[in-house]
Image (tube, helix red, strand yellow):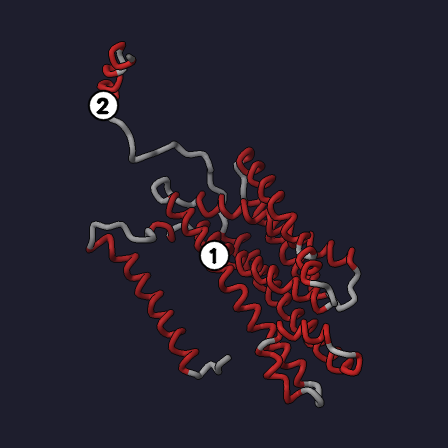
Amino acid sequence: MYDWSNPRTVVPLVVGILGLIGFGCHIKFSTKYSTCDPLLRPSLFTSLTSLSAYFATVIHGILVWCLLYYVPLYHEVRGSSPIDAGVAVLPFTGTVAPAAVVVGLLIAKTGAYRPFIWLGWALVPLGMGLMMLLEKDTETWKWVLIYLTGGLGLGILYSAQAFAAQAGASNADLPFAASFYAFCRSLGQGIGVAVGGVTFQNEFQKQIEKSEQFAPKAAEWAKDASALVQIIKKAPDSMDLMKETIVDGYIKGLRTVWLVLTLLACVALVVSVLCVKAKSLDRKFETEHELDQGTQEGEKDKSGPESDV
């Protein structure tokens, strides 16, 4: 909506960065000058395995929500109704839950999470890369197989990365690690639609600007490219040239989105292979809520015949 030099763009970025720096200082020094626990313990960031899991989880969230937003858009451009476009996402969403459950059970049984992380991050870049082959007239069986590849990888990572994020944390930090893992996924989901939107709209505008006839409308169309789908569906046959130009811009714009997702998935694959270490999932149960011996004996005395009555 605004240029990078516009105050509406610069001010929120600067304030956000300063806020992150201030939050980091609060985490680091709050325990030193206060008796209160920080929102995030600094010890969460001492394990390379946990750090890499948090980083990969952010990317995982970016991929999931970007796909959920732009895959239906791709199918609407092909002429599908909103309901049919939603059904087309099932190869992604339908494989996530079963894969997450099965992988969770296998990790709990074997105690090994690294092979599943590597497998997941191998399948996801493959699936994202294959999506760059999608055209307006791609056959159904082809895009279903492509979606299944990426969906299976994303489902595997839902469980595998949760184990990695918590394996590197101490018993005292486990609740914080689990919460921060969930936060990283939510953060990625919020970023995903924004990154996809910027990528798609910029590339869509470039493609429209290549047309001499419609170049003056490129900036206007790019600002609300999603709404154009319904317009071109209702456009008369006399506007075939415009429809063809817009659809071509959509396909190429989305192809750039798939490329960005592929590169992000490759980064996560490299980080996971190099940084995720094997750690034991077996640990002694510890809790701060424990009855001392005297209290336990007192409770036993109260459980006599009179107390039973």
How crowded pointer 1 is (Cα within 10 Å; few <14, some 14-19, many 20+) is rated as some
Of residues 156 and 298, the one nearer the viewer is 298
Where's residue 173, x and y in %? 36, 44
Helix, strand or loop at mark 1: helix
- Left or right of residue 201: residue 300: left
State the residue position of label 1: 186
Where's residue 162, x and y in %? 49, 46
- Left or right of residue 80: residue 191: left
Where's residue 87, x and y in %? 69, 55
User: Amino acid under label 1?
Assistant: Ser
Q: Is residue 238 visible?
A: yes
How crowded pointer 2 is (Cα within 10 Å; few <14, some 14-19, many 20+) is rated as few
Mark 2 or mark 1, earlier in chain: 1
Q: Residue at x 74, y 58 (%)?
A: 143
User: Amino acid under label 2?
Assistant: Thr
Q: Is residue 42 visible?
A: no
Mark 2 near mark 1, Cβ–Cβ under 8 Å? Answer: no
Where's residue 88, x and y in %? 70, 57
Q: Residue at x 50, y 49 (%)?
A: 276
Residue 253 image-quadrant placement: bottom right
19 to 147, vertically: above or below? below
Helix, strand or loop at mark 2: helix
Q: Which mark is residue 73?
A: none
Q: Which mark is residue 295?
A: 2
Of residues 306 and 26, the one nearer the viewer is 306
279 to 229, vertically: above or below? above
Which residue reaches farthest top? 305
